[in-house]
Image: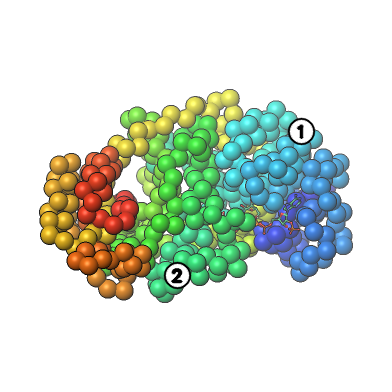
Amino acid sequence: MGDPLKLGLAGLGTVGVSVVKRLASMENELAVKAGHPIRITAVSARSRDKDRGIDLDNYAWHNDPVAMAKSPDIDVFVELIGGDSGPAEEAVRAAIKSGKHVVTANKALLAKHGNDLAKLAEKHNVTLNFEAAVAGGIPVIKALREGLASNNVSRIFGILNGTCNYILTRMEDEGLSFDECLKDAQRLGYAEADPTFDVEGNDTAHKLAILTSLAFGTRIDVDSIFLEGITSLKPADIAAADELGYRIKLLGVAQRTDTGIEQRVHPTMVPKESEIAQISGVTNAVAINADAVGSVTLAGPGAGGDATASAVVADVIDIARGLQLYTLGRPAGELQPYKRAKMRAHEGGYYIRLSVNDRSGAFASIAKRMAERNISLESIVQRKGKHQLKEERTTRSKGEKPQDVILLTYETTEEAVRKALVAIEKDGHIVASPQMIRIERL
Ligand code: NDP
Ligand code: HSE
């Protein structure tokens, strides 16, 4: 058995506390697997007095995570604070520059500074591990960086945010409100400190940006991601999708195209019988299409203390074992510049919900605008009932009763749909912005 590996743990929230508990409960077993005892020697958080349900007496306390990161009493700095700048970034940089290995669950930090941090880790000959940063307990970083290293990846997509999938599942299954579901996700420790990062899609984008780099050997470029979150979805959309044989999922998709690499995050209607539609609650799934293996799909818990701690501790074990890999799967200097594909060339079917004034000529005019853009309609359904939107009910005036009209298109381009919707809005037959959701037959 080798010398103990000494950890400094910054952040004692949902994930940090679970990591402390896991290391304690599996101490002997982990020492055998890693070849070294793994010991926390120092910790840092904001409040020393907070009751966290764990005993911190045996660890040196640091108010300042940066000072802890530089301390000679640690070998590995574990960053579980969060945020793409501030103390998390400063402490990670300080740790690397002091020759410490780093383990982080912080996708926001990696999405923004990953290229630079990878270079810095190489320069100082240390490991920067981040399995927990993408899809919680699913070992997808290991799969891409190691298990699938001999493949050329053509596409990677999936459900990458546990909070959003939990919200969408409960809204569909139990008819609960968005706010109620989000509160539960926060209570269960799934959501980010600022949950708008979850529901506006930023967290999925952070994770997708990291996966894209690993899958395609390109520099991380989170700013190029086309981004739509789930906040504009209404119960009417979820109910309509259900009736039409679909579920709505927030997907992150990255794929190689003739014009570059496409990265997009948006709500997607997927057929109920598809593999991805079966992924419910906090579960995440990542599907990888690659030349040698064909297709690999990994599914598992995407958020929560225990699942995330599983990935954090696995990263620590790899360091104890002496496994040292290039952070983004190849030397930082070999990563290619990211070339963005033309997003509007994306083809597929579309779900469109329009709140239409019920007056003569409205439907004919909508159908005409679609035809002008060569958009073929698979179906047009007029919906009435409890999912007629509240704000639309209040806008009714004499003789103009808005009705939800659902259009399903056949394959067409995003550009055609957007142009048709602009023309429909200009015609004045609809009373609210159109809802448009892409349909994917994955
Ligand atoms: P929490 O908000 O629960 O915990 C954050 C911790 O950081 C708290 O203990 C807080 O201290 C501490 N902290 C904040 N500011 C400082 C500072 N300046 N100095 C020292 N400590 C500080 O977050 P989570 O545990 O949920 O998440 C941690 C990281 O893991 C984030 O990057 C998150 O994105 C990521 N992650 C989270 C998952 C989850 O399911 N929750 C899953 C995968 C990744 P105090 O307690 O005293 O306020
Ligand atoms: N807030 C994130 C989620 C945590 O819900 O997926 C895991 O990264």
Alpha-carbon neighbours of circle 2 within 10 Å: few (<14), some, or many (≥20)?
some
Q: Nearer the viewer, residue 287 or 199?
A: 199
- Return the x and y of residue 183 as percentages of the image width and height: 55, 67
Reading the image, the residue beneath label 2 is 177
Amino acid type at image mark 1: Lys
Give me the residue at 51% from left, 38% from top.
222
Q: Nearer the viewer, residue 70 or 64?
A: 64
State the SS at label 1: helix
State the SS at label 2: loop
- Return the x and y of residue 395 as percentages of the image width and height: 31, 64
Alpha-carbon neighbours of circle 1 within 10 Å: few (<14), some, or many (≥20)?
some
- Return the x and y of residue 97 as percentages of the image width and height: 76, 33
* Lower sequence index among marks 2 and 1: 1
Give me the residue at 53% from left, 50% from top.
203
Question: Is the residue 53 above or below the residue 6 in the image?
Answer: below
Reading the image, the residue beneath label 1 is 97
- Return the x and y of residue 441 as percentages of the image width and height: 29, 52
Furthest residue to the front?
398
Q: Which mark is residue 225?
A: none
Give me the residue at 60% from left, 68% from top.
187
Question: Is the residue 258 above or below the residue 226 in the image?
Answer: above
Amino acid type at image mark 2: Ser
Give me the residue at 43% from left, 56% from top.
230
